[in-house]
Image (cartoon, grey):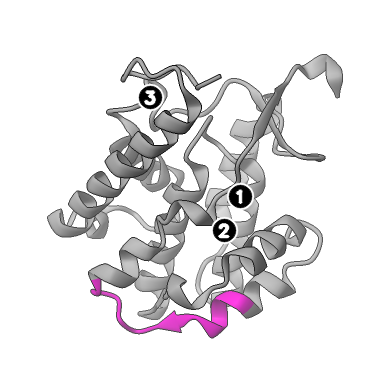
C-alpha cells in the first residue's frame, strides 16, 4: 500500500521510483540555485525547508512535522507527543566541532520529524552544518551503505561507529555537485516504516 501522495500512485514500488526521480531533480535545483547557502545551518527551519523543496510535488505533508508515531523494526522514533520538545532541544545543541555535529545529526535521526523522506533531507542538513562549521562535507561514495545503516541503528546507544564512518569520508570538495548528490541516494535510507498508535506504547 503506497503512502497517500499528490501523484495519485497506489503502487508502492512505482511511488518509490517517482519519489527518487523527483527528489533528485529538486535536490539538484536546491544545490544549483544557491538556496542551501541562505539557510541557517543546524536549525529545524532549515531542515524543514530542505524537506519541503524535495518532496512538495509528491506529498502534502512536505516540510511539516509528522502527526503519526513511526517505528522501524523494533526501534521507535520520538513519539509525536514529545516531538516538538525534542526538536527544540536538538536545535539548541552545539555544532562547532565534528563530534557535536554528528551528535546533533544522530538526535535528529531519532526524532525523525517527517512522515517520509527523513534520511535524504537530514543528510543534506548534516552536510550544511559540516560545510558551515568545518569547511567540509561527507563524500557519501566512501560510505558503505550497509555499514552506515547498521551504525545509524546503533547510534542512539553508541555513536562511535557513525562518527568513525563519517570522519573517514570527509572531503573539502564542498562545491562538488557529484559529492552532494550522492548524499540523497535512496540506498542510504530506511525502508519499511510502521505506524503505531500511542496506546501500543
Please provide percent x and percent y for residue 74.
82, 40
Label 2 and label 1: CA atoms lie apart by 6 Å
- Categorize mark 1 by other alpha carbons within 10 Å: few (<14), some (14-19), many (20+): many
Residue holding disc 1:
109
Residue under pointer 3:
59
Local packing at callout 2 (Cα closer than 10 Å; few below 14, some 14-19, many 20+) is many
- Residue in view at x 42 percent, y 48 percent: 121
Front-lying residue, 103 or 188: 188
| Residue 173 falls inside the magenta stretch | yes
Q: CA distance from mark 1 to mark 3?
A: 20 Å
Task: In the rendered view, tell whether residue 115 sits above or below residue 72.
Answer: above
Q: Are marks 2 and 3 in contact (CB under 8 Å)?
A: no
Is residue 146 shown left or right of residue 198? left
**CA–CA distance in space, label 2 to label 3:** 24 Å
Residue 111 image-quadrant placement: top right
Residue at numbered disc 2:
105
Cβ atoms at labels 2 and 1 below 8 Å apart? yes
User: Marks 1 and 3: which is nearer the front?
Assistant: 3
Residue shown at 46%/51% (left/top)? 186
* Residue 61 at x, y percent in the picture: 42, 23
Residue 25 drawn above or below residue 148: above
With respect to residue 128, does 44 lie above or below?
A: above
Amino acid at each position: 500500500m503506497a503512502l497517500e501522495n499528490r501523484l495519485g500512485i497506489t503502487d508502492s514500488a512505482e511511488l518509490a521510483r517517482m519519489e527518487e526521480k523527483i527528489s533528485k531533480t529538486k535536490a539538484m535545483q536546491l544545490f544549483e540555485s544557491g538556496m542551501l547557502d541562505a539557510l541557517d545551518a543546524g536549525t529545524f527551519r532549515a531542515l524543514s525547508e530542505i524537506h519541503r523543496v524535495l518532496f512538495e510535488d509528491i506529498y502534502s505533508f512536505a516540510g511539516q512535522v509528522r502527526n503519526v508515531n513511526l517505528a522501524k523494526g523494533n526501534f521507535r522514533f520520538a513519539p509525536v507527543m514529545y516531538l516538538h520538545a525534542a526538536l527544540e532541544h536538538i536545535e539548541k545543541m552545539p555544532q562547532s566541532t565534528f563530534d557535536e555535529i554528528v551528535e546533533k545529526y544522530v538526535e535528529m535521526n531519532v526524532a525523525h520529524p517527517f512522515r517520509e523522506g527523513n534520511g535524504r533531507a537530514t543528510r543534506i542538513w548534516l552536510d550544511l552544518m559540516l560545510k558551515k562549521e568545518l569547511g567540509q562535507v561527507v563524500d557519501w561514495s566512501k560510505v558503505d551503505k550497509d555499514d552506515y545503516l547498521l551504525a545509524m541503528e546503533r547510534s542512539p546507544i553508541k555513536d562511535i561507529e557513525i562518527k568513525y564512518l563519517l570522519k573517514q569520508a570527509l572531503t573539502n570538495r564542498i562545491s562538488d555537485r557529484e559529492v552532494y548528490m550522492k548524499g540523497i541516494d535512496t540506498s542510504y535510507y530506511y525502508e519499511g516504516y510502521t505506524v503505531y498508535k500511542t496506546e501500543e506504547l
